[in-house]
Image (spheres, rainbow, N blue to C red):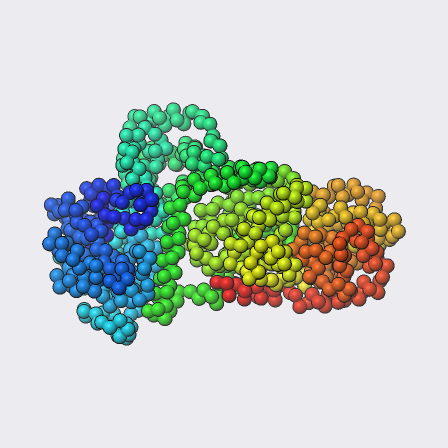
Amino acid sequence: MKIDVHVHSKYSTRPSQWFLQKLGCPESFTETRQLYEIAKKRGMSMVTISDHNTIAGALELAHLDDFFISEEITAYFPEDRCKIHVLALNITEAHHREIQKYRDNIYELVPFLRQQHITHIVAHPLFAVNDKLTIEHFEQLLLLFKNFELNGTRDAYQNDILRSILDNLTSEDIDRLSNRYGFEPEFEEPWVKHLTGGSDDHSSLNIASMYTLVPGATTLTEFLDGIGSGTCRPDGRPANPKTMAHNLYSIAYQYYKNKFRLERYVDKDVFLKFIDRFLSGNSTDKTGVFFKLQAFWGGMRRKKKPDASSLDQLFKYEAEKLIYEDASLFLMAKHGPKNQDNPLENDWFRFVTRASNNVLSVFGNHLLNHISGANVFDIFQCIGSAGALYTVLAPYFVAYTIFTKDRAFSREALAAVSGKSPDSRSNHPKVAHFTDTFSEVNGVAHTMQMFAQLADKHHKDLTLITCGQKSENGHVVKNFEPIGSYKLAEYPSQQFFYPPFLDMLEYVYENGFTLINSATPGPIGLAALAISRILKLPINGFYHTAFPQYAKYLTEDDAMEDVMWKYMIWYYNQMDKVFVSSKNSGEELTAKGIDPKKLVIFPRGVDTLRFHPTKANGFLKKRYNAEKKINMLYVGRVSKEKNLHILAEAFSKLSEQHPDARLVITGDGPYREEMRTKLKNTNCLFTGYLKGEDLATLYASCDFFVFPSTTDTFGNVILEAQASGLPVIVTDVGGPQENMNDGETGIIVRDITAEKLADAMENLLENTAMRTRMSQVARKNMENRSYDNAFNSTWELYKNAS
């Protein structure tokens, strides 16, 4: 015999009461008879309804032979009013009246139920009904109750921990708890617990998703005896955040459907019919002629797309368009879901995700167009309108937050009662590192690539989460398909990808990450921040790129730089820790308003095996047939914000006096053709983008390295050059200066101009002995900065943050 002992009718106040109060809706609108029919259709031997503190719904069905009256009692710990829900099965009206007298004190309620021989079960014992549940309360429940419920609205993680706690209780545990709380259990073998199952359904969407099975029982008496003797067992499927969110959507829809009598329009509107299929509990009712006519006409007409500033209207437009264009979704609207093995919440999640992704893509372009145009007032108006989309997606945010909180409490309960923990979160952090660059050619991407390789090598639990990138390391890198993208008019090679937010949220939750890192303040970084807040996870920000300075270079607008700084400071102040690659970067952020207590300099390394002086092999002669000269090298993005216009001017001056010098430019970017034109009468070689062994041998085959940038926060190429035995020339602004020793491994140019840069380059050109000495010291200094050492040091920082 199988029975779902935890189903609510329209008379039951919902557990998500705060959400309903926002809507002005204290009750469900699911009809009692409908609940009965659904339960029987789903294979229940008998049916009961366990409303909160009322049996009004149960009395409507009490005349049926295969129905019995139950109640879900809201009981309290009297000392602090912590709520506990207790299921009382097969009660009478007299029982119900007496229960109301005792339920304010759980210490009195439980003895009463036992004296009356009422089968009683503590429902969802690890769920804090009114946010007051503590480990002390849970431990006292272990003394008060024999029967515990695996609940259909909780996830497998929480239910599995509850089962583990109960299965491993010992008599010594009970004695310890009895001594602590000053009372003894009033039943035999209190360390032996019985588990039941119940769906805890409030919307008719998940009736009998979990239920109690008593093998061999054929009557209600035998069923209840099975619970008492422990021959019962829970069965069915647990929930997940998508289940709860689906129910919250249903709560709102059923309320408004009742309030505005939407049933008059359901069969006349394809969009409303689709919604009704998923949220009313009537997923398979037939469609009428009005629906068919409207579907034909509605699918043929062309609606004007709403402006992105009206996100609520835009969401409805995109959702309706999706239903018409997706054949499977249209068939669901017409006939209802056909795959009974796929829970409704999965199809609903897919629909909401796709519709919201379309909206987010349009909204992202709308916002970035305003930012690109520096339309400040329009920017704030655009951001304000995003509240409508937040409201639409709020059920998912709420659900994932609640389930995350439940998981944390479950871990605490397991550790408190048994001394065990399901994971070692501090010693073995599980890190999700969000980045918007991985396969591109830049220092940040190279760092991310090395992190992926080293995490694999050292068996660390790190996943790089990115979007629109290429990667062959699938078990370390999770690459999401972007829902849209945006290219800057001033910088076409720089592209922003919009991430699929709900898919990312689900991925981080399901994989149980304990720490989030964000390597970007862009769209993917915003997703990381939002996910960390929803899932209550610590988040570290990595400051890699000086975006405000880049914005000024690209737009030549001081106001744009100021706007970018305001955003950057806001973003990084949301972080628990801000990892900077240099002291200079930290001082810059502090000066702009970042709390200095948040700042941590994280170790950066270089591949000392790949980049090595012994790889010098005449690469330029072999590859480019370039005659022997003194070669000065630049490696990086060929763009103006790297001060390459200053380098071009400096080398032009230098070439007049030193025809034996060659400038090698390695990389690509928007300034390449203009720079080539400026240097057409000089001995300058543009190699384009090089990588791997070609890049390593190029480094080693040159004589010194020049890097005029004032916008780099670190500069990986400075380490690579020195590891290859090259002296380096850098500026006194930014992070590169901290990765070399002035006068020992290279030269720092202060207050950079073309003249000063040319002087530094000439100094190294003319002084062979100094180049040789600097080359040897540079290599020696880099040998202690291997990637392995840097990665292991960084991982220690993660342990402290988890």
Residue 106, percent across and down?
22, 62
| Number of numbered markers | 0
Q: Foreground residue, 209 or 520? A: 520
Q: Residue at position x 20%, y 43% from top?
A: 32
Residue 356, percent across and down?
45, 40
Q: Residue at position x 47%, y 50% from top?
A: 530
Whether residue 394 is visible, yes or no, is: yes
For residue 617, side relative to residue 734 (left or right) = right
Residue 28, percent across and down?
26, 43
The residue sitting at the right extreme is: 657
For residue 47, side relative to residue 518 (left or right) = left
Residue 164, percent across and down?
32, 65
For residue 757, side relative to residue 410 (left or right) = right
Q: Foreground residue, 317 or 368? A: 368
Q: Residue at position x 35%, y 31% from top?
A: 270
Q: Residue at position x 24%, y 68% from top?
A: 143
Quadrant where the N terminus is found in the figure: bottom left
Whether residue 219 is visible, yes or no, is: no
Q: Quadrant of residue 786?
A: bottom right
For residue 120, side relative to residue 766 (left or right) = left
Q: Quadrant of residue 318?
A: top left
Q: Foreground residue, 523 or 777? A: 523
Q: Foreground residue, 439 or 96? A: 96
